[in-house]
Image (cartoon, grey):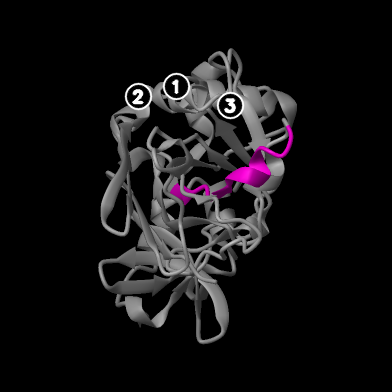
């Protein structure tokens, strides 16, 4: 099942994507679950969805994808969470040792757009980099969650292009500015429920820029895996339904290449994660 938020006929809603068909759950069960976040909080209940599933309401081409969760309380992101990515950043002289604790930063929701919407080029910099990432979407709330119980709090998974403005990221030791340019990243296209992903560590992440393979690794290569990530952030603040946890990017990012490769207006970036789908965006002006 693929759950997406979208715009259709000037109205924001959410539903199921089934091939080229779209079922509008907001129209059908919006009285009980007004948003996809509310449905995640109920652990994406199959019985509620099955009771209203039927003929499609729209064709896929009729909708505009939005970020799956419009108003997450938290967007937590990990840096340097793949061994080879750490090595390439270290070789570029930006870091020293592998992080002993999750290297955490936050993003704002207005730094992200949906699937198919152009990324906004920063304008003030030519160092606009791509980062393909697996995203965990929280369903069940919790505070100080133990790692062994972490997956009980996961509603499902989606994809992020965690677009970075590298020179702004490295202005100081605080990387947040380069990670939060307006509409510089994307998320989606949809959320796939946790129970439809067998072994999350076996998922493969691939990033293509203008059709050329740039990143290729599996989730098992993470330094701090999903249970540790959830344990760590839930010690700082309670998990809330709809929270977004971006788990870090593999090696192959643009700034570590010789010569560097950055995204330019007109480029197309595609991030595919097996079992979830493909997030793609052009780069706008």
Give the x, y percent position of residue 231.
60, 22
- What stretch of residues is rendered in magenta? 159-172
Drawn side of residue 11 relative to residue 175, left or right: left
- At 40% from the left and 46% from the top, the residue drawn is 193
Between discs 3 and 1, the one toward the N terminus: 1
Between discs 2 and 3, the one toward the N terminus: 3
Query: Which of the numbered marks, if any, corresponds to residue 220?
Result: 2
- Give the labeled residue for mark 1: 87
Q: Is residue 157 above or below residue 190?
A: above
- Give the labeled residue for mark 3: 94
Residue 240 visible in the snapshot: no
Nearer the observer, 26 or 178: 178
Between the residue at mark 2 and the residue at mark 3, the CA separation in whole angstroms equals 24 Å
Drawn side of residue 119 relative to residue 276, left or right: right
- At 53% from the left and 61% from the top, the residue drawn is 67
Q: Quadrant of the N terminus?
A: bottom left
């Amino acid at each position: 099942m693929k759950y997406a938020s979208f715009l259709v006929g000037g109205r924001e809603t959410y539903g199921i994507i089934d091939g080229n068909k779209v079922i509008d759950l907001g129209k059908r069960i919006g009285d009980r679950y007004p948003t996809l976040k509310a449905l995640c909080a109920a652990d994406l209940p199959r019985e509620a969805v099955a009771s209203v599933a039927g003929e499609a309401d729209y064709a896929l081409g009729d909708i505009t994808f939005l970020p799956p969760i419009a108003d997450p309380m938290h967007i937590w992101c990990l840096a340097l969470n793949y061994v080879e990515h750490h090595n390439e950043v270290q070789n570029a002289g930006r870091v020293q040792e592998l992080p002993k604790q999750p290297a955490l930063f936050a993003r704002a929701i207005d730094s992200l757009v949906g699937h198919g919407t152009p990324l906004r080029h920063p304008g003030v910099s030519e160092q606009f980099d791509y980062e393909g990432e697996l995203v965990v979407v929280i369903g069940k709330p919790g505070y100080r969650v133990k790692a062994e119980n972490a997956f009980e709090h996961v509603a499902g998974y989606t994809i992020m292009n965690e677009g970075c403005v590298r020179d702004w990221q490295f202005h100081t030791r605080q990387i947040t500015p380069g990670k939060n340019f307006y509409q510089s990243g994307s998320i989606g296209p949809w959320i796939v429920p946790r129970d439809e992903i067998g072994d999350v560590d076996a998922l493969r992440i691939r990033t293509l820029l203008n059709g050329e393979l740039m990143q290729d690794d599996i989730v098992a290569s993470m330094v701090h895996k999903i249970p540790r990530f959830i344990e760590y952030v839930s010690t700082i603040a309670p998990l809330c339904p709809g929270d977004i946890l971006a788990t870090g990017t593999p090696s192959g990012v643009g700034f570590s290449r010789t010569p560097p490769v950055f995204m330019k207006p007109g480029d197309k970036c595609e991030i595919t994660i097996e079992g979830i789908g493909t997030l793609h965006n052009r780069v706008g002006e």
